[in-house]
Image: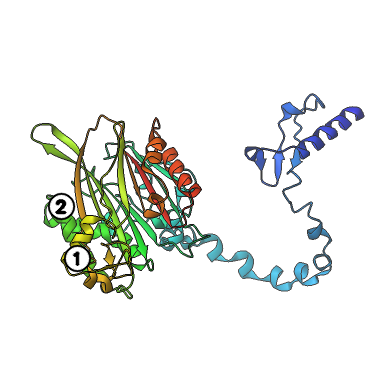
C-alpha cells in the first residue's frame, strides 16, 4: 500500500509539472479524474484534488502572503471591532436585497458595456444575434449600427448573415499604427439593415480624418441618420440626389465644428440594395460614393475594378477643374497645403478649389457570382497593389482571411498611416 501511495505521489508531482488545460480548472484547484488514478489506489468514493500549476500563483503557496510580518502581527486586521461589530458590514440590506444592484438600468446603458460587448470574444458572429446589443442610436434601434467604438485597435472581426440581407458576410479591422501615429483619425460606420419597409439594404462608410479626428468622428455619428431622414423625403427613390443632399447638409453642419477651417475628412460610402430592371428583373445594385483618396474595389472571377474615384492633385480631371475655377495647385497640393481635392471641412482651402461634391457611381452585379467589395482608407491602398489585392481574394471564400491577408500585407510593405479595412462578400 505504501508503494502505491509513493507511486501516486510521483504521478501527482508529474501532473503539477505538466500544463493543465483551462477546461480542467475548477476554482483554485484542478479536479483529477478518478479513472486516471484508480490504477494506483482502488479506494471507493475517493476524490483527489491537485493544486494549479506552479506558474500560476495561488494564495496557499504564496510565500509573501504567508510570511509577511505585517500580516502575522497586525492586530487591527484580525481584531478590529469595527469589522466584527459593524451591523452595516454584515447585514446591510442594500448589499443583499437591493434590486438596483442587479437590475439597475444604469448598468445596462453603461458605455463600457455597449462599447465592449461580444465583439472581442469571437471573430465569428451572426448579425441577427448582435443587432440588439451594439451601441444603437434611438432612430436605429435593433437595425445593427456598428461603428469604430465597437472594436479595439488591430482587432479582426467577422459578421455573417443568416437571412436575406444584402450581403453574405463582411470582415473588418482598424489599425492605429501607434509607432508612427499619435492618435487614430480613421472612423467607420456600418448600418446592417435599413429600418421599416426598407430592409435588406445596407450602408458601409469609412471616414479618414486629417488634421484631427473631430470631423471624421462627427460623420461616424451623424452620416447615416442624416441620410435616412433625407431618404424619407424622397421616398427612398433617386439615391444620387439623396447622397448629394446628404453631403451638402453635413458640410453645412460641419462649419459649426471648432477648427473646421483647418481640419477635414475624406469619405467613402457603399450602399447595397436591389432595384427592378425592366428586362432583367430584380438586380443587386451597388452605389459607391466618395470624397478624397479612400476608395473601393470590386473583385470577382473576371478581375478587379475600382468603383470609386480618387480626388488627388495629380489627377488630370481634378487639376482642370481647379484651374477652371481660378483655384491653385502648388507643389502638388491644393493651395500648397492639402493633397486631396475634395473633402468635408478644410474651409480655408475652398477658395483654392477644394469642394465637398461627391463622386457617385452605380453598378449592377450578378447575384449568382462570387463578388467581393474591398473598402479601405489610403493607409491601406498606398501600400498594396491591385494585383496583390486580387491574389489575396483569389480562390478564397472567407472575408476574414482576405481581410487579414490584405492588412498584414500593407503592414509588411511599410504603411505608416492609420488603416481601416472592410471586406464584404456579396
Residue behind mark 1? 323
Look at the picture and state if 48 lies above or below 375: above
Left or right of 70? Residue 274 is left
Left or right of 402? Residue 15 is right
Which quarter of the image is occupied by the C terminus?
Answer: top left
Residue behind mark 2? 240
| Image x and y of residue 8, in percent | 83, 31
Residue 141 occupies which quadrant of the picture? bottom left
Residue ID at (27%, 36%):
164
Residue 148 occupies which quadrant of the picture? bottom left
Spatial CA span between label 1 and label 2: 26 Å
| Image x and y of residue 52, in percent | 73, 44
Look at the picture and state if 408 lies above or below 328: above
Residue ID at (22%, 73%):
351
| Image x and y of residue 255, in percent | 25, 73
Viewer-side label of 1, 2: 1
Query: Visible in this render: residue 2?
Result: yes
SS class of the residue under badge 1?
A: helix
Question: Which of 350 and 225 lies nearest the eye of the viewer?
Answer: 350
Specify the color scheme.
rainbow
Q: Which badge, 1 or 2, is on the more N-terminal residue? A: 2
Amino acid at each position: 500500500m505504501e508503494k502505491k501511495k509513493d507511486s501516486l505521489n510521483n504521478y501527482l508531482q508529474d501532473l503539477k509539472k505538466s500544463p493543465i488545460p483551462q477546461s480542467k480548472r475548477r476554482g483554485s484547484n484542478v479536479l483529477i479524474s478518478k479513472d486516471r488514478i484508480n490504477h494506483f489506489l482502488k479506494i471507493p468514493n475517493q476524490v483527489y484534488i491537485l493544486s494549479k500549476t506552479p506558474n500560476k500563483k495561488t494564495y496557499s503557496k504564496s510565500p509573501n502572503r504567508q510570511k509577511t510580518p505585517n500580516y502575522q502581527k497586525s492586530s487591527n486586521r484580525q481584531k478590529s471591532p469595527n469589522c466584527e461589530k459593524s451591523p452595516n458590514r454584515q447585514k446591510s440590506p442594500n448589499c443583499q436585497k437591493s434590486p438596483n444592484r442587479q437590475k439597475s438600468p444604469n448598468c445596462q446603458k453603461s458605455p463600457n458595456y455597449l462599447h465592449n460587448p461580444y465583439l472581442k470574444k469571437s471573430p465569428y458572429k451572426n448579425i441577427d444575434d448582435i443587432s440588439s446589443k451594439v451601441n444603437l442610436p434611438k432612430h436605429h434601434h435593433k437595425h445593427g449600427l456598428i461603428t469604430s467604438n465597437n472594436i479595439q485597435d488591430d482587432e479582426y472581426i467577422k459578421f455573417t448573415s443568416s437571412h436575406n440581407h444584402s450581403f453574405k458576410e463582411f470582415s473588418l479591422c482598424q489599425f492605429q499604427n501607434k509607432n508612427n501615429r499619435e492618435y487614430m483619425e480613421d472612423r467607420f460606420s456600418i448600418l446592417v439593415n435599413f429600418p421599416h419597409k426598407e430592409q435588406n439594404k445596407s450602408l458601409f462608410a469609412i471616414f479618414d480624418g486629417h488634421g484631427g479626428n473631430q470631423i471624421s468622428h462627427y460623420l461616424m455619428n451623424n452620416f447615416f441618420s442624416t441620410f435616412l431622414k433625407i431618404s424619407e423625403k424622397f421616398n427612398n427613390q433617386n439615391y444620387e440626389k439623396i447622397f448629394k443632399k446628404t453631403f451638402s447638409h453635413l458640410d453645412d453642419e460641419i462649419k459649426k465644428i471648432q477648427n473646421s477651417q483647418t481640419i477635414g475628412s475624406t469619405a467613402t460610402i457603399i450602399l447595397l440594395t436591389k432595384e427592378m430592371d425592366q428586362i432583367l428583373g430584380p438586380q443587386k445594385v451597388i452605389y459607391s460614393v466618395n470624397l478624397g483618396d479612400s476608395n473601393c474595389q470590386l473583385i470577382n472571377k473576371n478581375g478587379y475594378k475600382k468603383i470609386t474615384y480618387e480626388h488627388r492633385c495629380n489627377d488630370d480631371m481634378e487639376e482642370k477643374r481647379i484651374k477652371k475655377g481660378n483655384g491653385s495647385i502648388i507643389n502638388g497640393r491644393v493651395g500648397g497645403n492639402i493633397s486631396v481635392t475634395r473633402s468635408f471641412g478644410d474651409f480655408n482651402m475652398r477658395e483654392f478649389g477644394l469642394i465637398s461634391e461627391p463622386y457617385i457611381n452605380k453598378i449592377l452585379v450578378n447575384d449568382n457570382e462570387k463578388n467581393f467589395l474591398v473598402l479601405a482608407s489610403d493607409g491601406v491602398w498606398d501600400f498594396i497593389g491591385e494585383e496583390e489585392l486580387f491574389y489575396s481574394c483569389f480562390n478564397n471564400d472567407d472575408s476574414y482571411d482576405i481581410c487579414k491577408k490584405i492588412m498584414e500585407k500593407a503592414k509588411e510593405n511599410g504603411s505608416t498611416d492609420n488603416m481601416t479595412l472592410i471586406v464584404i462578400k456579396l
